[in-house]
Image: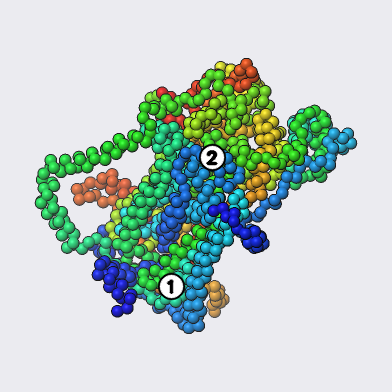
Amino acid sequence: MRKKNVSSLKSGRRRPAVSAALLVLGLLVTGGAYAAFSASTASAEVDLQSQQVITEGQKLFAANCATCHGQQAQGTEAGPSLIGVGSAAVDFQVGTGRMPMQAQGPQAPEKPVQFTDEQVKALAAYVASLAPGPSIPTADQLVNGNVANGGELFRINCAMCHNVAGAGGALTEGKYAPELKSVEAVHVYEAMLTGPQNMPVFNDLNLTPEDKKDIIAYLEYNKNHPSVGGLELSSLGPVSEGLFIWIFGIGAIVGLTIWITAKSN
Amino acid sequence: MSITAKASNYLDERTSISGAVKEFGRKIFPDHWSFLLGEVALYSFVIILLSGTFLTFFFQASMTPVEYSGSYVPLKGVEMSAAMSSTLDISFDIRGGLLMRQVHHWAALLFVSAIGLHMLRVFFTGAFRKPREINWSIGFVLFVLAMAEGFTGYSLPDDLLSGNGLRIIDGMIVAFPVVGTWISFLLFGGEFPGGDIVGRLYSLHILLLPLIVIAFIGVHLMFVIIHKHTQYPGPGRTEQNVVGYPVLPVYAAKAGGFFFIVFGVVALFAATVTINPIWSYGPYDPSPVSAGTQPDWYIGFADGALRLMPPHLETYWFGYTWSWNILIPVIILVVFLAVVFAYPFFEAWVTGDKREHHLLDRPRNAPVRTAIGAAGVTFYAVLWAAASSDIIATHFKVTMEGVINTLQILLVLGPIFAFMITKRMCLALQKKDREIVLHGYETGRIVRLPGGEFIEVHEQIDEFERWQLVSFNDNAPIMLRPNPRGRITSRMRARANWSRFFFEDRIAPVSKSEHMEALEHAHH
Amino acid sequence: MAKNEKAGSDLVASTSVNSSVELGTAVVAPDSFENPGFPAHRERVTDLNPKKMKRAERAVYVLFYLSIVGSLFAIFAYMFFPIEDGDTTSIRLNTLFIGLGITLSLLALGIAAVHWGKAVMADKEGVDHRHPVRGNDETRARAVEIFKEADEESGFSRRTLIRNGLIAAIVAFPLPAIALFRGLAPMNVDPNNQMKYTMWKKGLRLTQDPTGTPIKASDLTIGSAFQVIPEGLVDLPEKEMLNAKAKAAVLLVRLKPEDLKWADPQREAWSYQGIVAYSKICTHVGCPVALYEQQTHHLLCPCHQSQFDITEQAKVIFGPAARPLPQLPITVDAEGYLVATSDFTEPVGPSFWERSK
């Protein structure tokens, strides 16, 4: 099984062929390969402690957020207080485009981000300056986790809502747990830490920073390793498999039966 | 003597095979695409046997805990059963192993779909009528066995998805009055999940169930030979003949080639599309569960029935628990399947038609039967859709409660509407057929008559096309007459009522005199 | 609509071969059309055009050779795309190329055979005559006679004691097999008793799944959800562990104490400062109910969409479940760790027949 004794020359020759074949069959085989990098992290360039950044954030806040969250982020009828939510919550909500919300709905959906990275960080810095709260993880908090442990923790704590493959799932009354394959590691970390919307909070005593790192390692592994079986059919499990066999399987077979029994000409 | 002749002689002197060749070699099979659906089921089953045998060489049907040490990184060092671990080895460490797993599973899904489609074809064309009622029942049993095969196979890898599937089955079993708890204990060898279930399901999956399936397929095909295949009506075709191609050579080439084509399609799916990625699900553990936990498609209708029950259906009577939230869906499903099983006998009783039927009905020419079929399909489809209520909700951005409530209503109203609409459509199509026979078809040519009037020229169809439209079974409700003892029994009354339900709205085929009259009318 | 006003009175005897057979509701009109017989045979292009025939022949054998290429390709793929330990791409390629080779081999073979049958083999439709399925009268009479003779010779109907003995013996002989199947479940256990109790008992700490780390009340912030197993569960042997976990799994959440409404005031003592523990095993058919929405405080089962409201003692608010999730009574011990104050006070999981006994 494990042919370790293949000559390096041989395997060296094989690699280009492999890549070429992969290119040609790319769509068919992988259903769109996932970009193999993602652990883009909190940009270190912005200093969240700097008064200048905080002032910049305050201005942005007054212009974009205060209508719902109040001038001092104290909260209004339309939006909760942000005192003590920390920079992590802001970076998650604004950095994934969930905030500012466009319309009231069952939940704030992910949408194109409205601000530049610097602006997001400035907002985070401002909110963090109001009261201590969970802060944006550093780059080294997101890498080098244990994939196997992460997988186990993911299945126990996350899979019931987000699906074992991170394909997402339904919640009550039109809400849903989003898919995780396109979510950046830093946002996954922040979501666990802050429990946005209906997601429970996984504080550092529930899932330790080490545990969070492992879960992220597992998700990153899945992003970088498309299914060995081929097309993933959105990882929805038996429902998409059933639809596939009825539409493509039965479709192809019935087409062929018609060809077989049609008069040749 | 040539070597072939010598060999044939050797064989025949010991087997009298020449008799079989004489008997079956030129047997005629009618040709129609829909007649191949049963073959698809048969071929899928052969593919399942072949790929399944390969899998048994590597699979360990044991729940003994082991620490996974194969090459799939995210599960390394994780404690799991030998069943799960060996399934991972098949997928990640044996060349072609994953391919064979996927061939096996895709073929299984195709197997049940093909059976379902084949049953629909037989139903809607009335192929189940005398003398084939018993063969319908045998085919029905095969359908149920196929579902059982599928479910036992789905449960073998002992992954999270199948474990939760078994948990649901256990939850249903224990709800059964009186015997439920004990059946569950006997099945699982004690409390759920225990350490025996995988081994036991394996015996059923690879030994007992396949044996029964093979036996039933044998009987099913034997009856096809005894009855000879049905055929669609058409010029030259009668109840007394079969028109088609001989087994040798044309039918053998087509049917034989078709086996490889079906196998090829399954192999293509297996090579390119993931099915049941157990490595994502991980080993079974009673605490986790995945969003979107669903059974394979053919069990979906049962899962859907469970999902559609309203809350709080449970009573305590005589100190015991009656779980209506499980018993009602089970009763509904059993009744539904019983109706499917018994339909041919029921229709035979209603019509009282004791003739053999080898010419098929066009669905429109049996409006009520077709409408009943459409109602049944709708009922099944609603249950089926209910099994993916959560996925429908997320993908169409609606609430899951809305989906479920809508399907609850549809489960009752859907079949009724489907029945009415289908029946009306059939009658309308029959009327159109009559129109065409009587007045010809519209040519699209507009002619101006000398008087200034515009008419579209209608052209008569030829006698072969006409035969297609006029040669169908016509039924009329029976009249209630006292039996020889001068009595009208409630059974007779029921039969008369049913026959009215079936044949009250009736479009008779065009007769020769009607046609003549129409022609004469057209000439004036 | 041609409603049959005379209701079946216009039935006319069939003129077909089966005329002796009952027609039932079927109507055979006296002046129905006659079968026009077979239409003229239509030639295929390959019959009319020898060039086309040649081309079809060529297509058939080329496909057969292509099939061989596919088989060889699959074998080469097996050798040249080995699986390398831990490299998922190698598995993908191994599966893909062996699979595509087999696909080519099978499809080409199948299409070639079908094309041969359709385009090259003689296009001669045949007609077989059908016979009624029933045996002819003579055969049937002989069959009856055989049974009669056999009955006479054996005395099957006459010697009733023997016959009834045979029937009774045949009924009785499979019974031992039923007894043998009792061995499927362990002896000396009462299912009812086992299903009513879990591992939880007074003083047992609540620990985290899967590590078994004990949980302090202060570890839970508002909106937290912990997946919980009893202390000591991880030390059980694997088999017992799964059985115990299948009943003892618990979800622990913290709400604002004022959000919790207690229909049964005594139950308030089962919580600790807004921390409540509920069985994770659905009361419907037993799936783990762990989808906790921290703002609505609803618990959702992903299998059949039952919903439970944590603020109202986990009562059912939607879906097929009938009963609330059982609550585990908890408090804190001297060191501040959360502990159970007893087992669940009712059986967890799906309803079973003897549940209320």
Give the residue type at disc 2.
Glu
Relative vertical location of residue B372 with respect to residue B406 in this rendering, above or below: below
Q: Residues within 10 Å of mark 2 (few under 14, many from 20)?
A: some
Q: Which residue is mark 1?
A: C117
Q: Residue furthest right?
A: A52
| Residue occupying image coordinates x 12% and y 49% | C154
In the image shown, does B92 or A243 lie closer to the viewer? B92
Horizontally, residue B502 falls left or right of residue C77, namely left
Label 2 close to label 1 by CB (< 8 Å) = no
Q: Which x, y percent locates residue B54?
A: 45, 54
Please name the colour scheme applied to the rendered image.
rainbow
Numbered badge on residue B67: 2
Q: Which x, y percent locates residue A22?
A: 64, 59
SS assignment at label 2:
strand
Q: Tell me the subunit letter for badge 2.
A: B
Q: Which x, y percent locates residue B338?
A: 37, 46
Relative vertical location of residue B269 with respect to residue C218 in this rendering, above or below: below
